[in-house]
């Protein structure tokens, strides 16, 4: 049986049949891929504990007819800290959902894989809303969806400093904003943070401080922008909203 190696992160999983699972992985080598983990819902499985969501691991995979099969797992970082904190966990799901909705399967994006590792690591230590916003903005950039900053994406006029249009594609002018029912006024603090984070390195995220209110607006702006690109709602965002309440 042909086997191959991949370094990846478990983005999500669901049950298959009586004891198997299908895993959504994001790998350095192959981008997003789905693989089957056999019998991992049985208590005797030696793989089961190694396939929790957000586990970063080296995988040995065997080619299968429909889905490839997980043969071995060597955990690099289990990210157990994320799963113990419901608030951070919600944001980790948002990172996963952004990848699942915006990155097609079998498209290698090694730079996005690096971004995911940084994002998961920072989520454990800093304001998770800010980290998730940074991740989203950097992801848009890597995928060629960078939001406009200074010019209105619709007419090319000077964009208003804090007028955000998910549909048009970023900061826009007052006239064109009327054409997007989901446009919002982010406020100066969130708008400034959005511009900063779009270019920030992982180290720079750690230095940014914003109010809880601005962070919440920023997350909402990133989510609505992603939903407009994917043309469908992000489930993780609904879960987060429920958590915040
Ligand atoms: Zn315009």
Image (cartoon, rainbow, N blue to C red):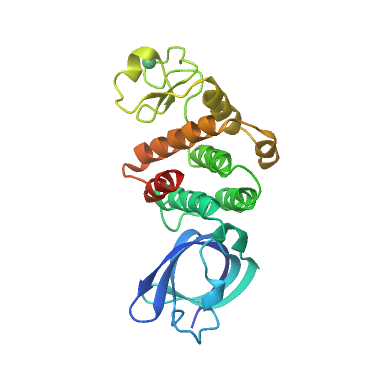
The picture quadrant where one finds residue 209 is top right
Q: In this rendering, would 206 be left or right of 245?
A: right
Task: Say which residue appears at 55% left-offset and 34% top-offset.
Answer: 212
Q: Nearest the camera: 91 or 159? A: 91
Task: Say which residue appears at 45% left-offset and 84% top-offset.
Answer: 42
Q: Quadrant of the C terminus?
A: top left
Instruction: Look at the image and tell me whether residue 3 can be seen.
Output: no
Task: Say which residue appears at 31% left-offset and 41% top-offset.
Answer: 231
Residue 154 x/y as whole percent = 37, 20
Q: Nearest the camera: 223 or 116? A: 223
Where 126 sits versus 150, above or below? Answer: below
Instruction: Look at the image and tell me whether residue 40 can be seen.
Output: yes
Q: How many marks?
A: 0
Task: Say which residue appears at 64% left-offset and 48% top-offset.
Answer: 122
Question: Whereabouts is ligand 1, in terms of quadrant?
Answer: top left
Residue 220 x/y as whole percent = 43, 36
Q: Nearest the camera: 167 or 87? A: 87
Where 57 sits versus 2, above or below? Answer: above
In this view, the residue farthest toward the front is: 245
Where 47 sits versus 198, above or below? Answer: below
Residue 190 x/y as whole percent = 53, 27
Where 82 sits versus 37, above or below? Answer: above
Residue 211 x/y as whole percent = 58, 30
């Amino acid at each position: 049986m042909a086997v191959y190696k991949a370094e990846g992160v478990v983005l999500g999983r669901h049950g298959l049949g009586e004891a198997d699972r299908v895993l959504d992985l994001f790998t350095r080598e192959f981008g997003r891929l789905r693989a089957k983990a056999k019998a991992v819902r049985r208590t005797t499985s030696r793989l089961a504990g190694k396939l929790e969501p957000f586990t970063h691991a080296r995988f040995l995979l065997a080619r299968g007819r429909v889905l490839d099969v997980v043969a071995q797992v060597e955990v690099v970082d289990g990210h157990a800290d994320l799963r113990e904190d419901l608030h951070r966990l919600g944001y980790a799901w948002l990172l996963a959902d952004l990848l699942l909705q915006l990155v097609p399967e079998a498209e290698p994006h090694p730079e996005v894989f690096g971004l995911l590792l940084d994002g998961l690591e920072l989520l454990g230590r800093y304001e998770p809303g800010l980290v998730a916003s940074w991740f989203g903005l950097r992801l848009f950039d890597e995928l060629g969806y960078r939001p406009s900053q200074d010019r209105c994406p619709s007419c090319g006029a000077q964009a208003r400093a804090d007028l955000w249009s998910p549909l048009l594609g970023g900061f826009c002018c007052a006239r064109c904003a009327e054409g997007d029912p989901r446009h919002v006024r982010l406020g100066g603090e969130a708008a400034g943070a959005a511009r900063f984070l779009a270019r920030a390195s992982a180290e720079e995220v750690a230095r940014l401080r914003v109010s809880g209110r601005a962070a919440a607006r920023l997350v909402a702006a990133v989510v609505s922008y992603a939903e407009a690109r994917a043309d469908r709602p992000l489930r993780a965002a609904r879960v987060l909203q429920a958590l915040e309440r």
